[in-house]
Each structure stands twice: as structure tokens, then as C-alpha cells.
Image (spheres, rainbow, N blue to C red):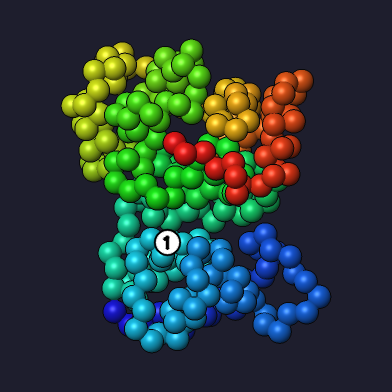
Amino acid sequence: MDLSELGAFVKSRRDRIRPADVGLPTGPRRRVPGLRRDEVAVLAGASVEYYIEIERGSGVQPSEQMLAALARALRLSRDERDHLYHLAGRALPADGGAAAHVHPGLLDLLDRLAGTPAQVITDLHVTLVQNPLAAALVGSESHLRGPEASFVWRWFTDPASRGLYPTDDHDRHAASFVADLRAAVARRGPRDEEATTLVDGLLARSEEFRTLWEQHDVAVRRAERKRLVHPELGVVEVNCLTLLSDDGRQRLLWFTPVPGTASVEQLELLRVLGTQDLVPER
């Protein structure tokens, strides 16, 4: 652990990032070449005081979650992300976990979708990062850890998670999740511990999952039309579009209203009112 070097490294990465690179306005007066410390703090979900202590290297030991948030806020490459964890004396997170390194290209696109609900997930349906509109539309998942971080896990083990979709659509989504998961498991290979643990756990806990898994259906979830149940807006009909990373392990999802339906006005209302009173409790 080298907290002094950690602070210097974080500051050096902050200095190289332009506000436009992370979706922030440039503004007429800026006295620093890169981001301000308060801007990085906001992007990482930390207080300004806490972030300043990190840069000072004065004893603050960031958690794995905070390191992941800093890596995303500062658009670190995988090597830079690994270096950040080494300096902090933390073990590197699993590739598919909630603290996994997010593909920089997908993050850049996410920043450019500020007016559209969008999020980056893994091929095991773990949400890595959401923009505010996505959190308002489908619920924030930033607090979830372990197996519960996977929406597929929650779908087959927690009945409350199915409230996101109308009851009539549950069978279709269950079959789609399993077919997509089978493709992901094969792509990762039999030695991937995260995928194997997820499947083994679901086989042990869900008869529905076992039945669908034994059918051996395979189909990667890409573009599809969905109906989402929002506690304030009601049923919102959207097109869910997907962009996959090169290795297929991460996906950028964004939601657009179906033309000619009430969802056009519903998503506009979501944008106008913001997220303060519309974040679903799932």
C-alpha cells in the first residue's frame, strides 16, 4: 500500500481529463487543465472532502467500491485501474462483478446519452453503471453485491424483482434470460468461477431455472421491445437496444420510447421531473 503515490496518481489522471470527455460543460473560466476535484468527487459519488484526502495521501484508505468509482470517473484503462488497486493495497475485483472495470468506449457512449435512460451491464446481467434516467426508470442497482448483483439471480430467487415487468411477460423474460445466460457461460468457458457459481446456485434454488436450463436454448439478448412497470409512470413501452463490447462481456443498454405510444410522453416526463421523486423501490 502506498497512499502517497495513490494520491499523486489519481491527481495525474484528473489533470488529463477534459470536462467534455465525461459529459461536463467546459465553462468560460477554468483554472485547471483537467477536471476539478469537486467534479471528480461528484462523478465518483464521494464527498469533496473525502476525495481531497485521497489526493493528499493522508491516510484515507478507499474501499474497493470507491476505487471502482474513481476508475470509471477518471476513465482509467485496465492497466491503470489495476495500478490504482495495487497502490491502495486492494485485490483486483472479478471481471464480471459489480466493481469490474467498465469498457472505456461504452462509458464514453453512456456520457453522450444523458437525455436517454442507459446503463452498462455484464453478460451475467450485473449492472456496472447507470445514468440517472436509467436509475429512475428501472431502479438503482448500485447497492447490490454478491450473487444478488445479477438480475438473473434475483429473477429466479426473489419474486419481488419481477415487478419490473408485467405478469403476462414473465414467462417470456424467464426463457430469454436463461437462453442468454447459456450463451454467456459457454463464451466464458468451464473454468470461469463466477459464471459456474451463478448457474450452480440457480440450479440448486430454482425449479423453474432448472427446467429452462435443461432445454439448452441459446439466444443472446439484443434489441427487443419491453414493457416496464414504473411505480409513478405506470407501464412504459420501450425499445431496449444493445451494444456489445468486443469480448461480449459487457453491454451498453439504452431505452427509447416506442413511437405512437404513451411512452413518448412518459419518458419526457421522466426527463423533465428528474430522478428525485421517481426512483423506483424494487
Q: Quadrant of residue 231?
A: top right
Quadrant into which the N terminus falls:
bottom left
- Tell me if residue 195 can be seen: yes
Q: In the image shown, does 254 or 48 lie closer to the viewer?
A: 48
Percent position of residue 164, x then y: 48, 28
Residue 152 % position (x, y) = 37, 31
Q: At 38% from the left edge and 87% from the top edge, which residue is drawn?
A: 58
Q: Which residue does the image show at 42% across and 61% down from the upper left?
A: 68
| Kind of element beneath mark 1 | helix
Is residue 155 shown left or right of residue 73?
Answer: left
Name the residue rendered at 49%, 78% in the picture: 49
Q: Is residue 255 above or below residue 46?
A: above
Asked whether, in this view, residue 162 is left or right of residue 214, the answer is right
Query: Compared to 223, does 212 lie above or below?
Result: above
Camera-side residue: 164 or 33? Answer: 164
- Is residue 161 placed above or below 23 in the rendered structure? above
Do we see residue 218 in this rendering? no
Q: Return the residue nearer the eye: 262 or 239.
A: 262
Q: Position of residue 247 (x, y in %)?
A: 45, 43
The total of numbered circles placed on residues is 1
Crowding at dot 1, Cα within 10 Å, few <14 / some 14-19 / many 20+, comes out as many
Q: Residue at x 69, y 63 (%)?
A: 24
Amino acid marked by disc 1: Ala
Report the side of 147 relative to 161 (left or right): left
Which quadrant is home to the C terminus? top left
Image spot of residue 2 (x, y percent): 33, 82
Residue labelled with disc 1: 68
Q: Quadrant of residue 88?
A: bottom left
